Amino acid sequence: MADYALTPDVAIVDSQFIESVPPRVVAHTGMDVLCHATESYVSAMASNYTKGLSLQAIKLVFDNLQASYAGDKTAKANMHDASTMAGMAFANALLGINHSLAHKLGGAFNLPHGLMIAITMPHVIRYNAKTPTKRALWAKYSYFRADEDYAEIARYLGLPGKTTEELVAAYADAVTALAESIGIKMRLRDNGVTKADFDRHVDDLAELAYEDNCTVTNPKEPLIKELKGILEAEF
């Protein structure tokens, strides 16, 4: 279900309620926060109002997720803020195919949403940064700029790279390194998905992901065969 009627008027952001969350859940939900912030930053509906929230949430995740995973209470509070800020951003800018794919993967293979988000994220970053076959509809910008947006994130984090391409690659690599540092295995086959089961589902998953609501605001409109290619790269 998705409707603005479900959006809360007030959020009580009190980190005492997440201090007992197990490390595995911290890892998965933390990567979901990072994806919320990243996808809303490059979304076709991103604006000056949402991008500031997205960017600061990304910085907070990189600065705090590892310590939060280790149990640090201050880091947990900062991650709670990051989660709320990213939520404020994507409630307005919406998301993209990272969520479209993860929604379907989690259902098909009975794996946690945040885990599927983490595995998918580097592949989507690299895919979205390439010149599109079709741009997203109703974009709030006059030219394709997802690659520049990812590069700007990398600059804000102080990642290495002189060109846009180098910065995009640095950000994708940083996402992978962060996930692995908190115990996430970044391939589907390393999380119990068999080749036979994957092959049986992949075509349907690609088609269902294309139809997901989040696909609409991805910075470029994917082809179903391109979504299948991302899924195959994840395996």
Image (cartoon, rainbow, N blue to C red):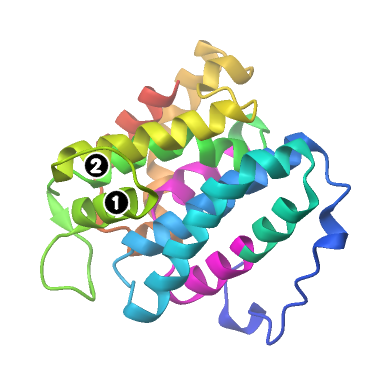
Residue under label 2: 167
| Magenta stretch encompasses residue 95 | yes
Q: Is residue 47 left or right of residue 100?
A: left
> Residue at (43%, 47%) from the top-left corner?
98
> Residue at (34%, 72%) from the top-left corner?
46
Give the number of callouts: 2
Q: Which secondary structure, mark 1? A: helix
Q: Which secondary structure, mark 2? A: helix
Q: Is residue 216 left or right of residue 95?
A: left
Q: Is residue 179 above or below residue 54?
A: above
Residue 233 location (% of width, % of height): 36, 24
Prevailing SS of the magenta stretch: helix
164 or 108, which is in the foreground? 164
Q: Is residue 13 above or below residue 80?
A: below
**Magenta-tinted stretch:** 82-107
Tell me the kind of residue under disc 1.
Answer: Arg
Q: Is residue 70 visible?
A: yes
Disc 1 from disc 2: Cα separation: 7 Å
Q: Is residue 46 above or below residue 103?
A: below
Tell me the kind of residue under disc 2.
Answer: Leu
Residue under label 1: 155
Q: Earlier in the sequence, mark 1 or mark 2?
A: 1
Give the quarter of the image for residue 16: bottom right
Q: Is residue 193 visible?
A: no
| Magenta stretch encompasses residue 162 | no
Residue 182 location (% of width, % of height): 63, 30
